[in-house]
Amino acid sequence: MIIEERKITVGEVCEGYFNDAEEGVVGYDERLDIRPKYQREFVYKDAQRDEVIRTVLKGLPLNVLYWCKTGEDTYEVLDGQQRTISLCEYVDGSFSVDDKYFYNLPADVKKKILDYPLFVYVCDGTDSEKLDWFRIINIAGEQLTDQELRNAVYAGSWTSDAKRYFSKTGCAADALAGDYLKGSSIRQEYLETAILWAASAEGKTIEGYMSEHQHDPSAVTLWNYFRSVIDWVQAIFPKKRKEMKGLPWGLYYNEHGKRTDLDPKALELEIQRLMGDEDVTKKSGIYEYLLTGEEKKLSIRAFDRRDALAAYEKQNHKCAICEEEFDFEEMHADHIKAWSKGGHTTPENCQMLCRDCNLKKGNQ
């Protein structure tokens, strides 16, 4: 890992400055991606932005900036994006501070701003070294997400194109699957989710997947996979419900996407039944239960202590199966008629079993 400290003036960073909502933000004679295409749209409020300029005018130090090397002499801002944009926008004449635009300032004050030295740490090394370093540095301001860190490490044509699909407000992923995804597109959470699903299908980690595809010319393969996931979800579970949001649909698709026994109409009837079942305490688990048959995904309501104590006394402190006597804390409240066979969590369906008998019954 190579970490180089540099002093770069505001004037140098502002050289060739270009800011476009679609094409991103560049500077430093077009060698610095200040905000790559479709990255986070967060911007400073006016008071924060103005304070950056006042700090420079007073000659006080700004916090260190962090850049990631992406080529022989090209870079991407890891931390310090908003400070950099504030400086460039002010020099570009986009806003005033204390009623003065940059072009209104005396020549000596302009020179003071343009000659102001920015302290920059430039990082270069292996992918794993960059990730480790990015995660341990004390990044000022709003913390970067894990995926934003990965985007810096694996910067390239593929990552830029993937951001186009997944990393902008109103992006294609948001329009297609916003009802199924949790988090925020501009914080890279949609992108992280899509890559996690695709990587899992190939037995890879997110980092491994991004490393493999870093220099691909486009991310259309990832996008087509993501669309296949959502198309499958909408075909199998056509009725949208709030409980569907944030579920790992890609992981379900990877395991069950080729099944031919999933009947959408029958599944919908079962969803309606389970949604109305008071014993099902985790409604979002219904979808995985219908795919896997694992009852534990539903978190079936347990008997409360009052009902358990009543059954314990009724049984004279004895296990309902082996009829041995046990202390209350050594026993488990159990459904006489299993929930899966129509039994409910009601006092009349409660029996107390010792741990061994309860375990044996559960394994049958």
Image (cartoon, rainbow, N blue to C red):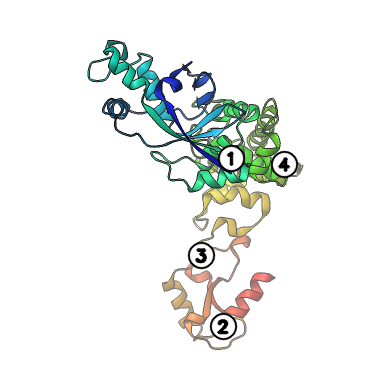
Query: Which residue corresponds to the image point at 65% horizontal and 73% vertical from the top-left?
Result: 361
Q: Which residue is mark 3?
A: 345
Q: Which residue is mark 4?
A: 257
Q: Nearer the viewer, mark 2 or mark 4?
A: 4
Which residue is more in the foreground, 58 or 210?
58
**How many numbered marks does the figure carry?**
4
Distance from Cα at disc 2 to Cα at disc 4: 44 Å
Residue 252 image position (x, y, % from top left): 66, 45
Q: Nearer the viewer, mark 4 or mark 1?
A: 1
**Residue drawn at (31%, 27%) of the image:** 56
Lower position in the chain sequence, tag 3 or tag 2: 2
Q: Is residue 124 left or right of residue 221?
A: left
The residue under label 3 is which amino acid type?
Answer: Thr
What's the distance in space between the residues labelled 1 and 3, CA to CA?
37 Å
Q: Please, what secondary structure does the residue beneath circle 2 have? A: loop
Distance of mark 4 from mark 1, alpha carbons? 18 Å
Query: Considering the image in quadrants, where does the C terminus appear?
Result: bottom right
- Marks 3/2: CA–CA distance: 19 Å
Sooner in the amino-acid sequence: mark 3 or mark 4: 4
- 326 in relation to 290, above or below: below
For the residues bearing labels 2 and 4, Cβ distance under 8 angstroms: no
Q: Residue at x 48, y 77 (%)?
A: 311
